[in-house]
Image (cartoon, rainbow, N blue to C red):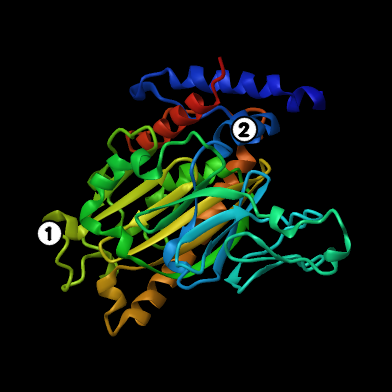
Amino acid sequence: MAALATSPDAGLDIARQLQANCERPFEDARAMPPRVYTSDAFLALEQREIFRKEWLCVGRASALGKPGDYLTAHIDEQPVVVLRDEHGALRAMSNVCLHRMSVLLEGRGSVRRIVCPYHAWNYSLDGALAGAPLMERQAGFCKESYRLPSVRCEEWQGWIYVTLSDDAPPVAARLEALTNLIAPYGMSGYIETFHEEHVWNTNWKILAENFMESYHLPMLHRATVGPHSRLEEMECPPGQPAFNYHWITKEASLPIGNAHPDNTRLTGHWRRTTALLAIYPTHLITLTPGYFWYLVLQPRGVSQVHIQFGGGLSPEFIDDPKAADYMATLKTLLDEVNAEDRGGVEAVFRGVHAPLAKPGNLSHLERPNYDFARYLAQRTALS
């Protein structure tokens, strides 16, 4: 039985079930089948057809301010390092030593050279091998023949994206429609002020879907943002091939939720509008006139998700004398909201394993979830 559960055919069977589910019109849309969240075989299909082929966000470019600053990430099983090189350019490379294949760097930091922690082979910031202790004694060794493989890396609106695919269109082309939608915010100028990493006990798609809809806010977040969430004010337009989004125009519960008085970019309703953006597959952004926060997801098997959690302020609030106080208040609120979300998505993951679990109809406020399911169905469908 175990072999059947993890076979490639099992993943394709689930993909076909998902595809059939997505053929319903939105007015009769249902949640995704439980096995989409619980099957190792379907996750393997996602890794092959989505994570190894799509552009994946790995962080904010402003976090890499000077040469040698780096961050690390994974594309499926491939460790990647992104750094600022000597010329100030962003560069992404394999984060695996070319000697005995140890992972080179961990987390985030700053280096003059990339030094392997195993045998001290070391690389310059362009990936060329700079030193290899005692290897000159090996006649067959040629230092100049070693260079860390490069990984495609592009910047969009201040975000860093990487991909293993040679065929993926440029990020700017893929997200051109989103660039136009959010142009009034000037998101590229927002500055990251905090970054954390967490692991939650849920499937990555459950957390992604939780972000995509605000239908749960009044109940799940009844102790925090729920009382300020007016579902009748939310707009959930149909999504695009590479992303979905929804809007809420409101008087913010925090001063930095609305545009700063010095903000001349935003006019009219834009000064009070919050955009919730889900860029497929795993980049989730709440963008307000005064601040932003985000999640970047990486599956760890079907039962855990690694989360990059970060955020910051618009340029006007960064320059405000009360910026530190504003940010402290925001961070306290976000931590409380995340704790509520964690309880919710971990409960859903427990529930989808139940023998009697059955997907129900979606609300009109869950249009982004419907579009996300169709994206997954399209990407995992094999002819």
Image quarter in which the N terminus is found: top right
| Residue 215 position within the rendered picture, expressed as x and y whole percent measured from the top left | 37, 44
Q: Secondary structure at mark 1?
A: loop
365 w.r.t. 197: above or below: above
Residue under numbered circle 2: 48
Looking at the figure, which quarter contains the C terminus? top right
Residue 175 lies, in percent from the top left, at 34, 42
* In front of the other: 97 or 359: 97
Q: Nearer the viewer, residue 235 or 308?
A: 308
Kind of residue at disc 2:
Arg
Q: How many marks?
A: 2
Left or right of residue 15: residue 291: left
Q: Is residue 5 above or below residue 105?
A: above
Identity, as a three-letter code, of the amino acid under mark 1: Thr
Q: Could you tell whether 82 is left or right of 178 in the image?
A: right
- Left-right relation of 166 to 123: left
Task: Name the residue: 59% across, 71% down.
Answer: 109
Residue plotted at (28% across, 40% down): 177
Write down the quadrant of residue 308 in the picture. bottom right
**Picture quarter containing residue 365?**
top left
Q: Secondary structure at mark 2?
A: helix
Asked if residue 267 shows in the view, the reply is yes
Q: Which mark is residue 375?
A: none
Of residues 341 and 203, which is closer to you in this image?
A: 203
Residue nearest the viewer, comparing 337 with 328: 328
Name the N-terminal-most of marks 2 and 1: 2
**Percent of width and height locating residue 305:** 61, 49
Observer-side mark, 2 or 1, equals 2
Residue tagged 1: 267
